[in-house]
Amino acid sequence: PLLESFGNAKTVRNDNSSRFGKFVEIFLEDGLICGAITSQYLLEKSRVVFQAKSERNYHIFYEMLAGLPTQQRQRYCLQGAETYYYLNQGGNCEIPGKDDAEDFRRLLNTMEVLGFSVEEQNSIFRILSSVLHLGNVYFEKHETDCQEVATVVSATEIRTVAELLQVSPEGLQKAITFKVTETLREKIFTPLTVESAVDARDAIAKILYSLLFGWLTDRINKLVYPRQEALSIAILDIYGFEDLNFNSFEQLCINYANEYLQSFFNKIIFQEEQEEYIREQIEWKEIPFSDNQPCIDLISQKPYGILRILDDQSCFPQATDHTFLQKCHYHHGANPLYTKPKMPLPEFTIKHYAGKVTYQVHKFLDKNYDQVRQDVLDLFISSRTKVVANLFFGHAQVMARQRSLVRRSSTRTRRYKAPTVAARFQQSLLDLVEKMERSGQAARLASPSTPQEPGLFEADVVSSQLRYSGILETIRIRKEGFPIRIPFLVFIDRCLGVGYHHPSKGRLQSSWGFWAQMGIPAGRKGWQGLHGITPPSQLFLKEQLYQALESKRARAHHLAALTLQRYARTFFIKRRFRSLRRKIVLLQSRARGYLARQRYRRMRRTLIKFRSLVHIYVNRRRYLKVRGGWHAPGVPWAPTPTLCLLTKREVVDVTHLEIPAELMGLLEAAAGGLPAPSCPPPNPHSQPRHPHPASIPRGAAPLQGQPQPLEPWMRLSLQEPAFGMLTAPLTAPLTRLDEELCHEALSIFQLILRFMGDPGLGGSQETLFGNYIVQKGLSVPGLRDELLAQAANQVWRNTNVNNEERGWLLLATCLSAFPPSTAFDKYLLKFVSDYAFAGYKPVCQRKLMQAMARAQLGAAAARTFPPSLLEWTANRRQASMALDLHCFNGIWNAQLMGRVCPWSRAHSQFPAVGRGLAEGWHGWSVAMKAGAQWAELAGHDYVLDLISDLE
């Protein structure tokens, strides 16, 4: 993070571009990193004072302004990034997706890990702040003695910079507005023009940042320097080839470095190729390639290379960019790699290996000079800030050593010439190449896209990078020779395999048959004889031959794969066949079992029907005997009250109507627990009279004459507008029902006929029979209105009082279990109010009103169980019901007897019984105890369902 913040910046192509070259050697010991050395080259110092449009200065400036606390920003007199000239030239001070404040906190953590003290951190921030304030030092023209000189406008910024760097304000102002010339006796101060003052200001800013960056790199190297010699991997991160809209001195140096590195890579490739060919006894042929050495000579060869001319011009005080350009035109105008502009423009064009690039010579000399005057060195060496003084003191020592080396190496006395930027650049490049030569092989990387988005690959961008980096030329050179190199034994295993191995001849000799089949000669020299000759370690192939070998190998693999697939498919098909056979056997066994169970069920149902017919026949005979009566000879016969009551209910004979087998079984079980009625014997001479069932037409008793309340409902809901008692089973439901419910509705009507007219029903059998009918309505909500309509139909104009009373009992019981629909309830209420049997009118009205109150819940308003024995008894007696309540605190008296109705819920019926109890008792619950079993109700449950459930 440290070098990234101080050495990376936003460019047009990359938001985090490395603006310096670094050569990192990572040392490994036992597979673990044990140290590293970072060498930095060619820091782009011009970015400190100038940025192109849509670019930024180095990240550290923006991170410092965003992350420093308010107190420290006030101490360094810092403001927003937009207020500084060195930061706002690019136009945008922010990068989307980058949090400068968070990156600054990460940078502070890194400094703490690297051992930077608080004082050193403050000194670093002082230097960075002083660079920003230097950029805001402005000048104006002022004439003195007919000479244009520069004067400082912003004296406040001068004082701020002097205070941050702990130097004299007057000395700092003189350093940027005067040029000092030293003679043997005195110093001559020459005022600078505005343009020269700006260059002096920028030079101080650049040297401050450059020395600080070098000091940080040295600190990191001292911390992570390896303790002992070890193997290393070197990583070079340097600028790529650049061709911008405006190419200046920096782009010339960068492209010269790329030219030199390309030449270096070409030499490595040729050297490796030649050594490997010699080692493998292969004839070496000269491979033509585009040598870029002429371009390198054009730029750097003595004495008239472009950079050499630039260095010479930098030594002449009167030299300008124009004179430098004219000398370049003069010496290189005829060079095919050098192009002069057709118009008199300050530029020239060089044909590099990656393409032509046009360079503008504006400020070439100023950027190349970039020297720190001695008076500036003395000023900052005297700084009271330890870090600043040490930086410039170390720089002064380096310059002194260079002077001494030049003097010792010179055979005659000459004036010391300070090294220029171009000279230092070339020396750094030589040092870099020397390190790379020691490193051996190298790998080169490319960026996949320009928009800096993940998962995006642009072929044009990658191909241009491959061309600019010389990879395409390297591939072409490699392709001219033998590009395919395979270890010999690997080739034998890969292309020949075990199929060509002969036990007697050995692995090597068995391969010659393959060469003969392929039409490949055996080789030369040692390949002519096989015995006693060591084979080469590698096999060199041309691309065409390699493709032919791969084609044959793929064909062999294809045939082998087909054979393998054939056997594999056979195995899987056999396994699937066995699995399917097991499943089919299992399925057959299950099917046979299912069919046997179905046959058993059919036989069982047939047997039950047969038994029911037998029982019907036996019961019919028994009934006829009881009905006809018999008595012993000489004993007068008199019918019992029970027999008289049963016979009065019959309108027609309904005992022949079928009833479900399950209901028949329940009735038989109920009958087994009751004693048979004691009846006198019938008169043997009397014949029983069986009235024939007569079917009354559906329109026999229509509601005509005076309008009745049921007429609107009959027109809407009944299939035929006829209403009245029937003595024969229905052929179609009364109401409009779905087809799947029609058969059930007709069966229910037969049960209603049996319930109302069967003289054999009584006691528990009557209750059981009625609950069976009610259960039909509870289980199928769609049949409820049909059931109520059938019951009402049978009591309308019923000529048999006892039969009608049984019908009203069934209707009251149904209203105790489920409510009618909202479309039927008002008409049924009117019918009950007008035509109810004596005593059943208030009972049915009360039950119907209570049911209508619950009808808003829909089908959920019905009871869960049919009515209990208590409800049947209350309906027969037309009376109300009450339950004795026992409280858990032991209280029991008449006041706690609770009155209930079929529609009483636990939450609405029983809280009232708690009135009058002692205070402090809160909450209630309804429970019922049957033996040792307790059953409790929820608040929305019906109370009488609890009794029905226990019954």
Image (cartoon, grey):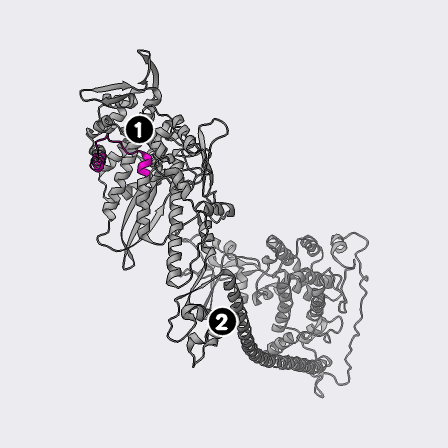
Q: Is residue 418 magenta?
A: yes
Graded by Cα atoms within 10 Å as few (under 14), some (14 to 19) or many (20 or more), the crowding at tag 1 reads some
Residue drawn at the location 63% of the way across and 65% of the way down: 774
Q: Secondary structure at mark 2?
A: helix
Residue drawn at the location 32% of the way across and 51% of the way down: 437
Viewer-proximal residue, 226 or 593?
226
Q: In which quarter of the view is residue 536 placed?
A: bottom left
Q: Amino acid at mark 2?
A: Trp
Screen quadrant of the N terminus: top left
The residue range painted magenta reads: 397-425
Q: In which quarter of the view is residue 417 placed?
A: top left
Graded by Cα atoms within 10 Å as few (under 14), some (14 to 19) or many (20 or more), the crowding at tag 2 reads few
Q: Amino acid at mark 1?
A: Cys
Percent position (x, y) of residue 243? 45, 38
Question: Quick check: 396 left or right of 254?
Answer: left
Percent position (x, y) of residue 389? 21, 32
The residue where tag 1 is placed is: 315
Judged from this view, the residue extending furthest toward the bottom is 633
- Please, is residue 298 above or below residue 177 in the view? below
Viewer-proximal residue, 860 or 78?
78
Q: Earlier in the sequence, mark 1 or mark 2?
A: 1
Question: Quick check: 318 left or right of 573?
Answer: left
Q: Is residue 900 magenta?
A: no
Screen quadrant of the C terminus: bottom right
Q: Main secondary structure of the magenta part?
A: helix
- Please, is residue 579 above or below residue 415 in the view? below
The Cα–Cα distance between marks 1 and 2, rounded to whole angstroms, is 70 Å
The residue where tag 2 is placed is: 515
Question: Quick check: 688 left or right of 153?
Answer: right
